[in-house]
Amino acid sequence: MKCFNEESFKVFDVEGLDERMVAIRANIQPIFAEIMAEVSARLSDDVGHETFVHIAQHRRRTRYAPENTWSAISDNKRGYKSQAHLQLGIWDNYVFMYLSIIDNPAKREQYADYLAEHHDFPDDFVYSLDHTKPEFFSVTEGLEKGIQRLHDVKKGEFEVGRIISRDSKIWQEDPQTYILETFEALFPLYQHLNA
């Protein structure tokens, strides 16, 4: 299975929208396609129905090169933002594996209510409150406030999972297994939120 390497991170050094998109298509999207096909197959077995892989194309961009890029898995063939979904993405200094609730989905408050009662995440998990920014926080700090913000703020977002930093030893060990195990740990949450 293909996986990220130093060349993947160097894509974000490429100047210019068109030039960076060529690099993303060549160096990152094939990795997304291969890993997420495996994750989707495992998730479909777990939830008992088909799931669909989506890879960000950044077609609405006309000027600025993307600072990150991602892929997603959802129950919806046409898109993923309308529900809680799984994301595999990359910034210039880390790769993330998240369960994501972004862009004001219809069940945002229900998601928050469920998370408020079921947020016993492993200590090495992190969360993000804005998918457009690279900041993330340990689940051991301020998690309840982040979940409450998802509930109370119309544009509130919440993503939870693991990251692999660019300089992590995991890249020299077994990153594919780490990525797949992270997503499998998120499968029950994905299933409950989308029931």
Image: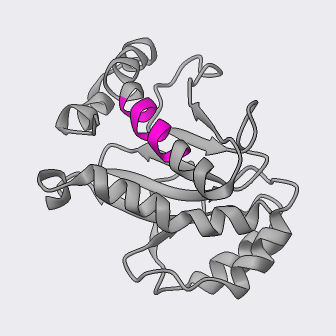
Residue 32 located within the stretch drawn in magenta = yes
On the picture, is 107 further left or further right than 47? right
Is residue 101 in view from this perspective? no
Please give the range of residues in magenta.
Answer: 31-40
Q: Is residue 16 above or below residue 130?
A: above
In this view, the residue farthest toward the right is: 106
The quarter of the picture where the N terminus appears is top left
Q: Nearer the viewer, residue 162 or 148?
A: 162
Specify the quadrant of the image occupied by residue 17: top left
Numbered marks: total:
0
Instruction: Say which residue appears at 70% left-offset and 41% top-offset.
Output: 80
- Against 186, residue 73 (above or below) is above
From the viewer's perspective, is residue 185 above or below residue 170? below
State the image quarter where residue 167 is shown: bottom left
Left or right side of 86 for 108: right
Please report the residue visible at 40 percent of the width from the left and 39 percent of the height from the top: 35
Quarter of the image for the C terminus: give it.
bottom right
Vertical placement of 123 versus 182: above or below?
below
Main SS category, magenta section: helix
Residue for point 27% across, 39% down: 4
Is residue 11 on the magenta stretch? Answer: no
Residue 29 rendering spot, x and y as whole percentages = 42, 27
**Looking at the picture, how far across and down is residue 42, in whole percent?**
51, 50
Q: Residue 48: horizontal and vertical position, in percent?
A: 69, 53
* Residue 87 visible in the current orientation: yes
Comparing 9 with 74, the one in front is: 74
Query: Is 103 in front, or is 170?
Result: 170
State the scheme by which the image is colored: one colour
Q: Residue at x 32, y 32 (%)?
A: 12
